[in-house]
Image (cartoon, helix red, strand yellow):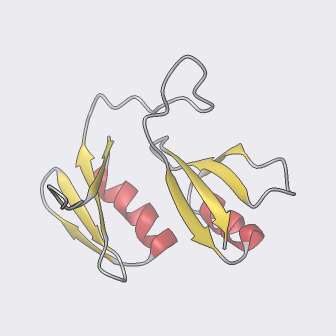
Amino acid sequence: MALAELGVVVLDCPDPRALAGFYAEVLGGTVQAQEDWVDLKLPGGQSLAFQAAPGHVPPNWPAGDDSQQFHLDLTVSDLDAAEKGVLALGARVLDAEDRSRAWRVYADPAGHPFCLCAC
């Protein structure tokens, strides 16, 4: 028997509304903003949350001696189209040179790593 249920994954960032807007464009869903906290209610019932952290320092990728802390794997049907879309929204490439792989690594506008993964 589990002791708990996962409620929500929370990303620290300097501007919760802006980062929630980025992920709303990528994943869909509805943004529900409070003062220093923003929830993104995703289709299917999951949520992703964003918390104001004025001193936020994005993780390094590849991690090397530092921990990347976490990353999101986002499943897509067309890697090239999804890549074009996330870059237009402000993501930046971290590792997408190997086009033979079924995944590519990017950073969101606040610097959190995420992967686009072909389904």
Residue 78 is left or right of residue 60, and the answer is right
The residue shown at (76%, 49%) is 96
Residue 36 at x, y = what percent? 16, 50
Relative to 74, does residue 96 appear above or below in the rendering? above
Residue 51 at x, y = what percent? 23, 48
The quadrant of the rendering that contains the C terminus is bottom right
Residue 117 is left or right of residue 19, and the answer is right
Relative to 72, does residue 95 appear above or below in the rendering? above
In depth, the one of 2 and 74 nearer the eye is 2
Residue 54 at x, y = what percent? 26, 33
The quadrant of the rendering that contains the N terminus is bottom left
Residue 8 is left or right of residue 71, and the answer is left
The residue shown at (61%, 21%) is 64
Task: Please give the count of numbered marks on the rendered protein.
Answer: 0
In depth, the one of 35 and 77 nearer the eye is 77
Residue 113 at x, y = what percent? 53, 44
